[in-house]
Image (cartoon, grey):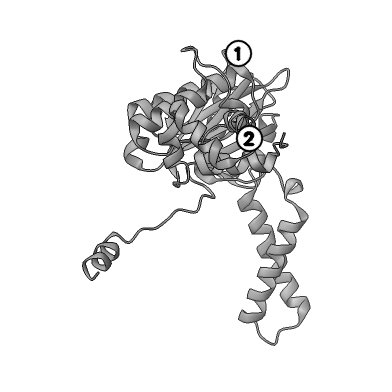
Amino acid sequence: MTQITAEMVRDLRERTGVGMMDCKKALVAANGEIDIAIETLRKAGQASAVKKGNRIAAEGVVSVASTADNKTAVIVEVNCETDFVAREARFKSFAQQAVNCALVAGVKNSESLVQTQLDSGKTIEETRLELVSQLGENLAVRRIYAVHAEANGITAAYVHGGEAGTARIGAVVALSINDAALAKNLTMHIAAMKPEYISETEVPAERIAKEKEILLAQAQEANAGKPLEILEKIIDGKMGKFLKEITLLGQPFIMDPDQTVGALLNSAKAKVTDFVRFEVGEGIEKKVTDFVGEVMSQVKG
């Protein structure tokens, strides 16, 4: 019997859009023959997902949910192909079901999440496949992240705009003290200001080295002939500004720009222990279609 490798499962998933476990089962049944596995998935009623699995899903929503005691908050991104479907009630309901399921099940990645069971008795993956057929677009549960509060702390979750816990931008944060208002304000700040790290100590050395390299090239171009010591001072100043811009503690607090988030937290004797910000479609390469050009090329034959 052919050994089913992770690469084979991943290849079938990429070609079909079907969940990892279902892909593995299909490959086992097909003794590793990917074309037969695809046919098996089609016969199982998943043909529409197979047809749409390679289409880019870069639109969608971000959904958030929190436990009743606000000790855990979860954020999930669910994608579709168009903003029209992203506004569709069934799609938004699916995204909210997915994040609620993630919160209850405590799963840590989308592969595990899609195999969890909803109240309907169907898995998220089975529900996704049904929606693919109903809505006519490829759908994907792309990513998930959870923050957990320390013993005396609290979490908060926020989506910017939207309704019923779904929008294009969302954030979750874990705070070391039990201050719900402060935690909520921090999620709003994070959603608006896009910090990448909590503090400068978290910024990877490679990221700093790359930025210095870019700044040095810019400084040499703008200050030709100046000695290296002068250029290094210019770079140091710009690096300081850069690090403040990408770190939560270094940013001016959006609700009071006269103080940084770091100063705000110090005055409250609090720390942010974890956070994340999701924006729909981040990092997805979107296909830009020239519809006029396509039509003209067909007309010209």
Given the current orientation, which residue lies at the most extreme bottom position? Answer: 225
Residue 3, percent across and down? 73, 36
**Position in image of residue 179 (x %, y %):** 61, 22
Label 1 sits on what residue type?
Asp
> Is label 2 in a helix, a strand or a loop?
strand
Amino acid carrying label 2: it is Phe
- Give the quadrant of the C terminus: bottom left
Earlier residue among tags 2 and 1? 1
Is residue 189 at all visible to an observer of this figure? no
Q: Residues within 10 Å of mark 1 (few under 14, many from 20)?
A: few
Q: Secondary structure at mark 1?
A: loop
Q: Position of residue 224 (x, y in %)?
A: 66, 85
**Would you identify the image quadrant in which residue 289 lies?**
bottom left
Height in image: 113 above or below 265?
Answer: above
Q: Residue furthest left?
A: 299
Q: Quadrant of residue 253?
A: top right
* Residue at the image point whose x is 74% and y is 77% from the top: 230
Q: Is residue 63 left or right of residue 173?
A: left
**Cα distance in 3D space between marks 2 and 1:** 18 Å
**Foreground: 143 or 50?**
50
Q: Is residue 118 left or right of residue 210?
A: left
Observer-nearest of 13 and 73: 13
Q: In the image, 76: left or right of 247?
A: left
Q: Which residue is mark 2?
A: 275
Query: 78 and 174: which one is in front?
Result: 78
- Is residue 53 something one can see in this rendering? yes
Horizontally, residue 62 falls left or right of residue 297, namely right
